[in-house]
Amino acid sequence: MANSIQSQPAYLLHSRPYRDTSLLVDFITQDFGRISAVARGVRSPKSKTRALLQPFIPLMINLSGKSELKTLGQVETQSISVALKHKALFAALYVNELLVRLIHKQESDLEVFSLYAGTLNNLALSSEIEPVLRNFELNLLELLGYGIDFSVVEKSSEKEKLTRWYYFHYETGFEQVDEVNSKTEKYFSNHTLQQIAEKKFTTLETQKSAKRLLRAALSSHLGDKPLSSRSLFRKNIG
């Protein structure tokens, strides 16, 4: 990566206090993936940059430094932030946390950046957040090389779609089963999996099943540390 990065499109994903007046910040950038940086002096009352360092605002940033931890320079807004309220706001915080946890630093992927920007817009415009989140999760896993293989589902006949059941292993994929254990959340009907594979989240049953499936698929990559955004959502939304 270059020692100096100029006018890079970015979004702030996360920030935390650093020393007396600074912040440690994580960005998702268009050309350089996720970047961590020190924003020096931005917590000072005289700083004009602090107001810009908020999530969901399209930014143009300058960065410098030879190490993995960069120094943030000039920050400008590209446009106004998307209007995220209530459930959409907490959903967007969840999206931010997924990117921080799943994307390695300084791995460039324009498609991930575009997926993120599009997801923010979809959350702001859609009356239902569940289909937006499931699409984001499926697409993100695919872009990161962890995509779910639905090929075993796609080969089934119309009759089998209604009668077949599968157990999901995050390492090996779907295994057809003869009996379903109601105490385990990793069982899925063929019909429901077909809907998820086609990203048709129109029914409540499909939405619930997709949420279970994606949570199982993501858990193997997120590790044991729980997501803070999930508990925040439950606390404020229920």
Image (cartoon, rainbow, N blue to C red):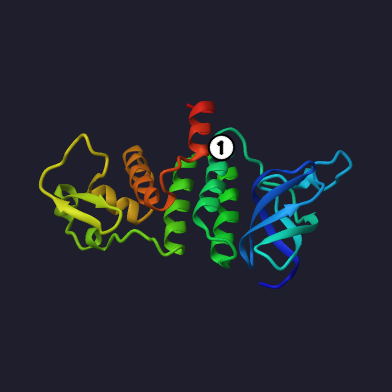
> Does 147 sit left or right of 107 as displayed?
left
- x then y, percent, for residue 63: 75, 63
Most extreme residue toward the right is: 46
The quadrant holding residue 50 is: top right
> Does 12 sit left or right of 146 as displayed?
right
> What amino acid is at disc 1?
Phe
The quadrant holding residue 175 is: bottom left
- x then y, percent, for residue 237: 51, 28
Most extreme residue toward the front is: 19
The correct choice, above or below, for 194 with respect to 86 in the image is below
Q: Residue at x 17, y 59 (%)?
A: 157
Task: Specify few, some or many for label 1: CA neighbours under 10 Å numbering under 14, 14-19, or 20 or more.
Answer: some
Front residue of this view, candidates 73 and 57 = 73
Most extreme residue toward the bottom is: 2
The correct choice, above or below, for 50 with respect to 140 in the image is above
Total labels drawn: 1
Helix, strand or loop status at disc 1: helix
Which quadrant would the N terminus be assigned to in this image? bottom right
Q: Residue at x 46, y 63 (%)?
A: 143
The correct choice, above or below, for 181 with respect to 5 in the image is above
Q: Residue at x 31, y 51 (%)?
A: 195
Residue at image mark 1 = 90
> Does 46 sit left or right of 3 as displayed?
right
- x then y, percent, for residue 170: 30, 54
- x then y, percent, for residue 6: 77, 67
